[in-house]
Image: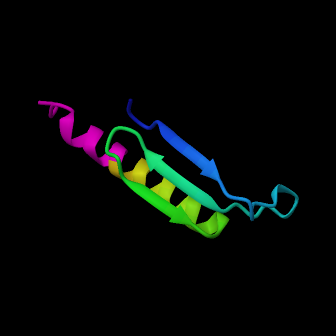
Amino acid sequence: MRQAFVLQLGADTDPARQHFVGVIEEVDTGRELRFKSTDELLAFLGECFAKETADDAEDRPLRE
């Protein structure tokens, strides 16, 4: 399950303020983060996406 995540939001989450707190896990790697801010959550997602796209680029055959 590439680029699939499990997200559990904590009691301190306040969507009206766009403030999210909780735990996120990347399903295929098991990598997990307890985040205390929306910025931490978005940074984790960005890192996972960047790694996935870099891995995809390495798997592509070179054009001749």
Q: Position of residue 54 (x, y in %)?
A: 30, 48
Vertically, is 64 above or below 55?
Answer: above
Scheme of image coloration: rainbow
Horizontally, is 10 left or right of 45 in the view? right
Horizontally, is 29 left or right of 49 in the view? left
Q: Residue at x 56, y 67 (%)?
A: 40
Span shown in magenta = 52-64
Q: Residue at x 36, y 53 (%)?
A: 31
Q: Position of residue 47 (x, y in %)?
A: 42, 58
Q: Position of residue 2 (x, y in %)?
A: 38, 33
Q: Position of residue 48 (x, y in %)?
A: 41, 51
Vertically, is 40 above or below 25?
Answer: below
Q: Which residue lies most toward the left here?
A: 64
Vertically, is 63 above or below 42?
Answer: above
Q: Residue at x 19, y 35 (%)?
A: 59
Horizontally, is 62 left or right of 55 in the view? left
Q: Which residue lies most toward the right here?
A: 16
Vertically, is 54 above or below 64?
Answer: below
Based on the displayed image, in which of its 4 quarters is residue 26 positioned? top left
Q: Quadrant of the N terminus?
A: top left
Which of the pair 22/16 is nearer the observer? 22
